Amino acid sequence: MTLVSSFFTRVRQHPERIAIVEPGGPRVTYGALARMICDYAAYFRSAGVGSGDRILVTLKVEIALYASLYALWSLGAVVVFPEPAMGLTGLRHAAGIRIDAWLAPPVWRAIGQLFPELRRIRRGLSPPAAADGARSGPLDADRLSATVTSAAAVADEAPGLIFFTSGSTGRPKAIVYSHTFIKDQGRGLEPLFRPNPGEVDLVAFPLFVLECLDLGSTNVLPNWDLRKPRTASLDAILRHARAEGVTRLLLQPALCERLVDKTIPPAVRAVLTGGGPVFPDLLRRLADKVPEVYSIYGSTEAEPIAHITAAEITPADWDAMDAGAGILTGSPVSQLRVRIVDDEIQVTGPNVNKGYLDPAQNASTKQIDGEGVVWHRTGDAGRIDAQGRLWLLGRLEGRIGGLFPFGVETVARRWPDVRSAALCAGPDGAPVLALTGAAASLDDWRRRARELGIDQVILLDDMPLDRRHASKIEYVRLRRLLEKTSATR
């Protein structure tokens, strides 16, 4: 079953349920969204879009985006998403592969003419303005039949999406997701995402909206710039959540770090977070605020790998994490196989990418065993405990002697006045602990660090974080910062 066929199953079950709510009030039911999809599909078909065409999509996260995705997929087209955190650079990088058309507002396409990679795209598309998601009335039978028939003809294994890694360790890599692959990702997430009756989700991950629609919930779109979670107005976000009766928050850790200092609307029963390490101190503080808290571990190439609820963590587990055992991520999802090779977490399964669009990029992250099984090397260090649960120790390249990043950082984050912590190798190869927080506690931090075997502690005004979710420390940038600091001494 393709993504579109699955969506139309939900439409038949509850056409009058609200599917998507935009900031400011615009909303669309499952039935009305289906009408939009049929209208959009007819428009794209008339514009010459066909099976296998690659469509670069740069639309705002609005109702029209999701109508466009389903419409393109119903025609067998492949959606290409640039890496949003890289801005124009990511857009130009995505245009470096074969692209058949660019779906974007006209003004964006006009600006694109300034750049050779985008100028090469000969066909421009925009969502048809005539399709109004708020209009009422029955589905046009002919268009519905044409869309459903077209979608049913798309093979489950056909490519549906080309996405890019964040590029934190080099040039972003293009990954092809088939319809089956995306559905398998959904199966791994379903135990967490399965909605209660009347569920209303506020989702900060645009692709997760597809999973939530697939399960039939109402999806409230963000009212903040997704690229800037650390500067988004929490008061505005919480007003948005209250106004729409949100019951679940799906947010990156950077937002959750700030959320715990606020009064969360009483209707919110659960918080789901991922896209970066969910440190135990954050998980514990969230659990004090919300009845259900879920932590998800995964990556662009393998989503999800494992997940856990705060309620599943025992007192002994909390003590172990506080003592530096790493971050407990829970049992691996059922369809995955996980192994630890030289401290590295490696995974294989139906929701694990088997290779990049450019095969030359496979060498560093793919490994084929003696049975021909492709394993993805996550680059993360970890271990599996006696109960079969996965513990995350941080990036493998961040290991310094016997010290692992999360083993140190989970401990340091609990020290008085520490906001964030990062273990890194200094210019001389010795471990350095970088901290943000109150400068008055620096001497105390140094004393505590020496007990961990770390002689160098530096205070930073701000920690370098990833551009996608602002939730992962960028150790390459941190090492460069340390080198500059050392050079000026």
Image (spheres, rainbow, N blue to C red):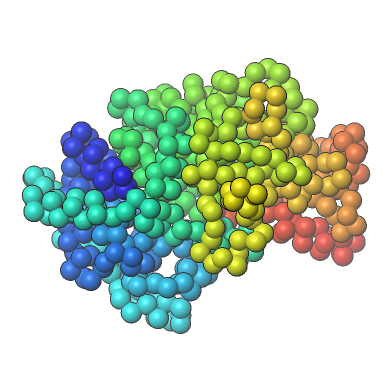
Residue closer to the observer: 271 or 37: 37
In the image, what residue occupies the spot 11% across and 47% down?
139
Say which quarter of the image contains residue 25: top left
Residue closer to the observer: 466 or 485: 466
Q: Is residue 326 above or below residue 224?
A: above
Judge whether residue 253 can be spotted in this image: no
Say which quarter of the image contains residue 358: bottom right
Please indicate whether residue 423 sits to the left or right of residue 365 in the image. Answer: right
Say which quarter of the image contains residue 489: bottom right
Give the x, y percent position of residue 476.
Answer: 72, 58
Give the x, y percent position of residue 321.
Answer: 72, 28
Tag count: 0
Please indicate whether residue 294 sits to the left or right of residue 486 in the image. Answer: left
Q: Residue furthest top?
A: 315
Judge whether residue 304 can be spotted in this image: yes
- The N terminus - image quarter: top left
Q: Residue furthest front?
A: 371
Residue closer to the observer: 25 or 65: 65
Give the x, y percent position of residue 91.
Answer: 47, 68
In the image, what residue occupies the spot 46% across and 82% down?
116
In the image, what residue occupies the spot 36% across and 29% down?
195
In the image, what residue occupies the spot 27% across and 43% down?
7
Q: Is residue 120 above or below residue 410?
A: below
